[in-house]
Image: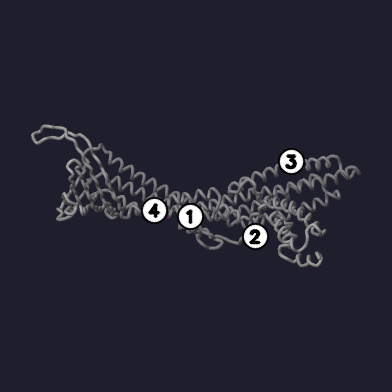
């Protein structure tokens, strides 16, 4: 019966999973044995199913071992993947994100200061039971007991005026006093109260904030993009640090195995007198040095892997293996165009502009403090009092207040004049430093573009040298095997081959390092011909 039924069972999806994966999950095994098999045929009476049970147990343990091995599987990463991961989860990326958030909320605070502010103040109740002194009409004093409860509510609206530097305000208030001993109440109301305060001939801070704060926020946006490009440059360095360490490890392993084979050949040839003792000792010394280099290369790989792992935010169990980019994009950058992009996009340009404006603001503030100053304060409102709330808002009386305060410096021993000249000197210093910094910045861009444009030629030279050096070593090795070159010449060819291989990887590294340096300076991608941008809304989530 089992022979007739098993072909049908073998084609079911559940049985296929069981047979292919050895039932790696114990719950699946119980399901298979306790639910699927009973009712079809007896498990204990069938030899084949007994064998299948034993095999499932074997696959259970072997599958668990395979899962354990897969958890320790080496993670292969390309350069683009390393850069992308660094921009998402590296500690430096998280720090840049929070720094931008801080600038964002600083800008939001500035915008909030320009909008009307509404506030409510209330006190309910304010109980006062005390003994206080009271002056009678004849001038004598006596102590009386007070037993009063008061309540107050005030709603106010304030709006700064950026054009003049003043402030407009409006408020309405209600005040109530209850005499607990007499059982009476009284009300004082201010239905509306409108006023403004305005400095005359003074410094207007709102005018300068309107110039500085939007520029500061735009600088913060560009600074975040620059920080991300700096993180990309750091990722390139760490990537090729590990990549070069892996190449050195491959070279060390090859040299150790190769010198071991050559040592065996040399010993055989020495026994028949084909080579001298000196050459044999050279080969043996090369093999010992290759072993030392192999151990050092292993340690260096672990060190570089640990640094990259920490930079990317991975845990210590992540095993990273890098795939070196062999394809290099064919791109050439015009220096003047790069300088133009840098002046348009780099946050340093915005920083210099902001510093100059802030220096002009300080001069204007110091100059305003030198001369005549006056403040104007005016209020117009309606108010009323009553012993009954229903009459408190009827027929309010007009209340007005006007105040002009002046300040004229008479003698300050040159204090204000000195501050004014200091501000002017700082302004000239800032302008000079900004002009010098802009020139230096443009020169840095020119030099970086020159380095980048030379990388294609250097990379081609390094690739050709790597090919020639490997072919030369293969020829030297074959000639050594037949006794036509000495061990010294073979070691020299090996050193040339290793040096050329490292030089080729270094040339690839220099290309990508210079490319991301150009991106950081210009905030422009010359491969895809687009300005670098970020979705800043996602940063605020």
- Image quadrant where residue 51 sits: bottom right
Q: Counting other residues with Cα less than 10 Å from the Cα at mark 2, is it few (<14), some (14-19), or many (20 or more)?
A: few
Mark 4–mark 2 Cα distance, whole angstroms, equals: 45 Å
163 and 85: which one is in front? Answer: 85
Could you tell me which residue is drawn at 62 percent across and 51 percent down? 239
* Badge 2 or badge 1: first in the primary sequence: 2
Mark 1–mark 3 Cα distance, whole angstroms, equals: 49 Å
Q: Which residue is mark 2?
A: 327
**Span highlighted in magenta in the image:** 213-217
* Badge 2 or badge 3: first in the primary sequence: 3
In the figure, 137 relative to 71: above or below? above
* Badge 4 or badge 2: first in the primary sequence: 4
Q: Which residue is mark 3?
A: 292
* Residue 445 screen position, x and y as percent: 51, 54
The secondary structure type at the circle numbered 3 is helix
Q: Which residue is mark 4?
A: 108
Q: Counting other residues with Cα less than 10 Å from the Cα at mark 3, is it few (<14), some (14-19), or many (20 or more)?
A: few
* 227 horizontally vs 392: left or right: right
Quadrant containing the N terminus is bottom right
* Badge 4 or badge 3: first in the primary sequence: 4
117 and 128: which one is in front? Answer: 128
Q: Which mark is residue 539?
A: 1
* Residue 487 screen position, x and y as percent: 81, 45
The secondary structure type at the circle numbered 2 is loop
The secondary structure type at the circle numbered 4 is helix
């Amino acid at each position: 019966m089992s022979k007739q039924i098993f072909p049908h069972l073998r084609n079911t999806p559940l049985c296929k999973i069981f047979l292919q994966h050895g039932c790696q999950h114990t719950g699946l095994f119980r399901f298979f044995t306790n639910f699927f098999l009973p009712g079809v045929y007896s498990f204990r009476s069938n030899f084949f199913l007994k064998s299948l049970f034993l095999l499932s147990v074997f696959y259970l343990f072997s599958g668990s071992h395979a899962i354990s091995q897969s958890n320790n599987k080496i993670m292969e990463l390309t350069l683009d993947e390393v850069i992308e991961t660094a921009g998402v989860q590296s500690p430096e990326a998280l720090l840049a994100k929070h720094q931008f958030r801080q600038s964002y909320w600083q800008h939001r605070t500035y915008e909030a200061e320009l909008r009307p502010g509404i506030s409510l103040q209330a006190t309910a109740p304010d109980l006062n039971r005390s003994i206080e002194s009271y002056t009678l009409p004849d001038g004598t004093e006596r102590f009386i007991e007070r037993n009063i409860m008061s309540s107050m509510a005030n709603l106010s609206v304030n709006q700064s005026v950026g054009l003049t530097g003043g402030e407009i305000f409006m408020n309405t208030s209600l005040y109530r006093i209850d005499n607990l001993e007499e059982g009476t109440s009284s009300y004082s109301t201010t239905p509306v109260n409108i006023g403004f305060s305005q400095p005359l001939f003074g410094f207007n801070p709102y005018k300068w904030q309107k110039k500085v704060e939007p520029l500061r926020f735009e600088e913060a946006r560009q600074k975040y993009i620059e920080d991300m490009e700096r993180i990309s440059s750091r990722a390139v360095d760490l990537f090729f640090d590990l990549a070069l360490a892996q190449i050195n490890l491959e070279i060390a392993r090859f040299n150790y195995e190769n010198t071991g084979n050559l040592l065996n050949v040399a010993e055989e040839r020495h026994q028949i007198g084909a080579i001298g003792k000196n050459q044999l000792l050279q080969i043996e010394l090369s093999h010992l040095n290759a072993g030392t280099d192999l151990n050092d290369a292993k340690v260096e790989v672990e060190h570089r892997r640990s640094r990259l792992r920490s930079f990317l935010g991975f845990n210590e169990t992540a095993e990273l293996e890098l795939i070196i980019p062999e394809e290099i994009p064919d791109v050439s950058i015009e220096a003047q165009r790069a300088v133009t992009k840098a002046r348009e996009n780099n946050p340093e340009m915005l920083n210099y502009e902001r510093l100059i404006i802030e220096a002009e603001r300080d001069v204007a503030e110091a100059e305003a403090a030198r001369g005549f100053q006056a403040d104007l304060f005016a209020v117009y409102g309606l108010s009323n009092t009553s012993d009954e709330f229903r009459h408190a808002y009827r027929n309010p009386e007009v209340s007005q207040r006007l105040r002009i305060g002046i300040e004229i410096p008479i003698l300050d021993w040159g204090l204000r004049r000195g501050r004014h000249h200091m501000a002017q000197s700082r302004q000239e210093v800032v302008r000079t430093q900004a002009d010098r910094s802009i020139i230096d910045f443009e020169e840095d861009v020119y030099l970086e573009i020159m380095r980048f444009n030379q990388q294609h030629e250097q990379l081609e030279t390094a690739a050709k040298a790597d090919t020639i050096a490997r072919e030369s070593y293969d020829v030297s090795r074959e000639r050594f095997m037949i006794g036509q070159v000495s061990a010294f010449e073979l070691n020299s060819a090996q050193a040339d081959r290793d040096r050329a291989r490292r030089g080729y990887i270094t040339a690839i590294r220099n290309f990508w390092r210079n490319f991301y340096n150009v991106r950081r300076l210009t905030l422009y991608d010359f491969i895809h011909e687009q300005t670098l941008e970020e979705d800043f809304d996602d940063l605020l989530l």
